[in-house]
Amino acid sequence: MRGHVLIVEDDRSLRELLETSLGKAGFRVTAKAGGEEAFELVGRQDFNVVVTDLNMRGMNGLELCERISANEPHLPVIVITAFGSLDAAISAIRAGAYDFITKPFEIEALEITIDRAIRYRALQEEVRRLKVELAQTKPFHELIGESPLMRRVYEMIDAVAASDASVLITGETGTGKELVARAIHEASRRSAGAFVAINCASMPEALLDSELFGHTRGAFTDARAERAGLFVRSSGGTLFLDEIGDMPQVLQPKLLRALQERRVRPVGSDVEVPFDAHVIVATHRDLEAAVKDGHFREDLYFRINVIHIELPPLRSRGNDILLLAQYFIGQFASRLDKQVLRLSSPAAAKLLAYSWPGNVRELANSIERAVSLTRYEEITVEDFPERIRSYSHARLPLISDDPNELLPMEEVEKRYIRRVLEAVGGSKTAAAQILGLDRKTLYRKLERYEAEGEEPQAT
C-alpha cells in the first residue's frame, strides 16, 4: 500500500470517485462526509495524509485543518479549493495545510501531491527519531554515525587499539581521518601518552625533516639549540602522519628506516635515537596508483599498510547525514546562543539528496551557516548554500533530437564517471571494474577533473 489516506468530502459523487480512484492507485482509503466525524477518526486511527474539501457543511476544511494542525501537527493536510480562490488557498496554508489543489483537477495530480505529502511526513518522523536517537547515543570517541559502514569502522578501531602495528587510514578529504586516529589512541594502552599530529603536505621538505626527526644545534642556520623530533616526542603515545601520500620522495627512505628500526637520526647528528610511538598515517590519495606512478615507495607503502581502515564518504552513509546534521545543529546553536532545534523536512530531503564532495567537514560548515542565518527554530532549505539548494544528480541527455541538448564526449564521460562513483559509494576499485578502466587510468582522469575544479566524488 502507498499509504493510508483520509478523504473528507460532503459531495457524495466526488467522495466516491476519489475513494475508488485512489484505491485503484494503491492507497488505503477511508472516506468521511463531514469535518466533525473526520476529526474524531484522526484521533483513533493512523493516517498518512488527509485530503479535505474546503467548503463543506458544518466544520469546513479550514477549521478541520486548524484542528488537525493543533492536535496532530505532523499529519499533512491537502486542501481542495475552487478554481481561482487564491485567498482561500493562502488561508489554508496559514492554517497549517501542507498543500492545496484546485478544482477541476486530474486524479494523477492529486496522487503526486499525496505521495509528496507522505514522503514529507516520513522525513518529519525520521528527523524526530534521529533527534531522539542522538540524545540517547553516546558518540564513539567523538565519531557520530550508526550506519553499517561506520559500525565496521568502530569494530576496526577496537581491534586496532590493542596493537602497535602501523595503521593506514584512507578516505576522501573531510571524512574524519584524524578523528579515527584519535579514537584509536584513546582506546589504546597509550591513551595516557601524547597524541601528536602533523600534516606532511603543509611543510617544506627541510622543515618537515627537522620536525619529524629532530636536529642538533648548528645543523642549519636557525638551529640555535638541539630539538627532539616528533617521533621521539610522541614516545609513549601516538604519532599521526596526515597526508602521507604528499610526503616528499626524498624523505620517504628516512621514514621507512625509522619505522623498520624504531630509531631516528636527527638532522646534523651521527647518533640514532630510539622512540616508542604507535605510528598512524592517513591520506586521501590512492597510494597504490602513486606506487605504480613512482611517486610513492612500494616498500614504504607495505610498511605503513599493516592494518588498513577505509572511511566511507558521507554520501554512502545514509541517515548518518541527518544524525550528524542534528548533532551539528546542537553544537552551533549552543555556541551561537540561538534557539535552533531541528531541520525542516524539505531541508532534510535536500541534505540526503546532495552528494557531499567535502564530506563531514562540508556538512558541518553548511549547518553552521544555516544556524547562523536562520531566523526560526527550524532550518529551512533557504538557509543552505546555493550548491545544496540547486543540486541535482547528473543526467546524460543522450536520447534527444535537439542539438542544443547534446553534450561533448568528454562531458558525457565525466558525468558518467560521476554517476558510477556515486552508485558504488565512491569506491575507485569498483568503479574502475564497471568502467572497464585500470585504476591508474581512472586515477589520472580524476586528477584532471580535480585540476579543472570539477572532480567527481571518489575515494
Image (tube, helix red, strand yellow):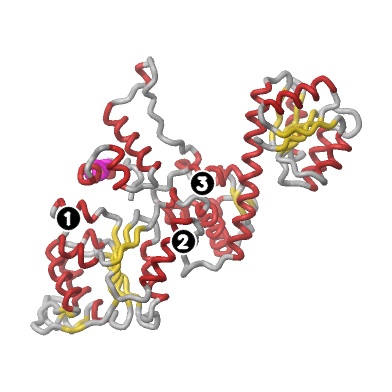
| Residue 78 picture location, percent across and down | 72, 33
Q: In what element is the residue under mark 2?
A: helix
Residue 151 placement (x, y as % from top left)? 46, 61
Q: Nearer the viewer, mark 3 or mark 1?
A: 1
Location of residue 27 in the rendering, given as x and y in whole percent from the top left corner: 69, 32
Numbered circle sitting on residue 351: 3
Mark 2 residue type: Arg
- The verdict on residue 446 being magenta is yes
Locate residue 350 relative to residue 122 in the image: left or right: left
Residue type, mark 3 in image:
Leu
Callout 2–callout 1 Cβ contact below 8 Å: no
Is residue 41 positioned above or below 213 on the image? above
Residue indicated by mark 1: 291
| Residue type at the position of mark 1 | Val
- Disc 2 or 1, which lies upstream in sequence? 2
Which residue, as the protein is rendered here, is positioned at the far right? Answer: 58
For the point 75% across and 44% down, the residue is 46
Q: Sort mark 2 into few (<14), some (14-19) or many (20+) by Cα contacts within 10 Å.
A: few
Mark 2 to mark 1 CA distance (whole Å): 30 Å
Residue 308 has which mark?
Answer: none
Q: Earlier in the sequence, mark 3 or mark 1?
A: 1
